[in-house]
Amino acid sequence: MAEPSGLNKTVLVVEDDEPLREVIADTLEKEGFRVLSAGDGLSALSLAKDIKPDLIILDLILPGMSGWNFRMKQRGDRVLRAVPVVAMSGWFFSEPRVAQLKQEPFAFDGFLLKPFSLDALLQTVKHLVA
């Protein structure tokens, strides 16, 4: 039997849509990841500082502190800046725009356009925490 790919890896899921957040968490937990979640950017930033996750999956449109602002604060933190972040959004993004998101000042490590498949989620996460 194959060993779960997420063994000993922690993922922070930041999504204000609770049902979607639960689906993402359940999917990752089945793959052996330890998953913590937050419904807004401010709570997520505090949680990230406490747990220092291996990966952050970040919705861009959040109440309070947006995903964009979260990313800027995260990149300004000497401990958290190295944590890879996968942005996700339901907004329409063209391929050139997605390419821009992977450059400065945000430099997202991956991007998932909602709705995305669970296979795409797993492929992206496994690639970034390998």
Image: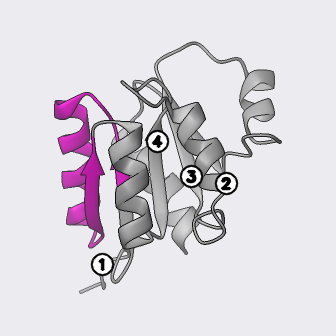
Three-letter amino acid code of the residue under disc 3 = Val
Task: Classify 10 Å Cα crowding around label 4: few (below 14), some (14-19), many (20 and above).
Answer: many
Looking at the rendered structure, the secondary structure element under dot 2 is helix
Residue 45 spot, x, y in % from top left: 43, 51
Could you say which quadrant of the image residue 35 lies in? bottom left
Assess whether mark 1 and mark 4 are in contact (beta carbons under 8 angstroms). Answer: no
Assess whether mark 1 and mark 3 are in contact (beta carbons under 8 angstroms). Answer: no
Residue sitting at 46 percent across and 19 percent down? 90
Residue that label 2 marks: 75
Height in image: 5 above or below 95? below
Assess whether mark 2 and mark 4 are in contact (beta carbons under 8 angstroms). Answer: no
Three-letter amino acid code of the residue under disc 2 = Arg
Does the magenta portion include 6?
no
Could you say which quadrant of the image residue 28 lies in? bottom left
Assess whether mark 4 and mark 3 are in contact (beta carbons under 8 angstroms). Answer: yes
Task: Measure the C-alpha gap from mark 1 to mark 2.
Answer: 30 Å
Is residue 112 in view?
no
Per the rendered image, the range of residues in magenta is 12-38
Tag nearer the camera, 1 or 2? 2
- For residue 58, the mark is 4
Looking at the rendered structure, the secondary structure element under dot 3 is strand
Residue that label 1 marks: 4
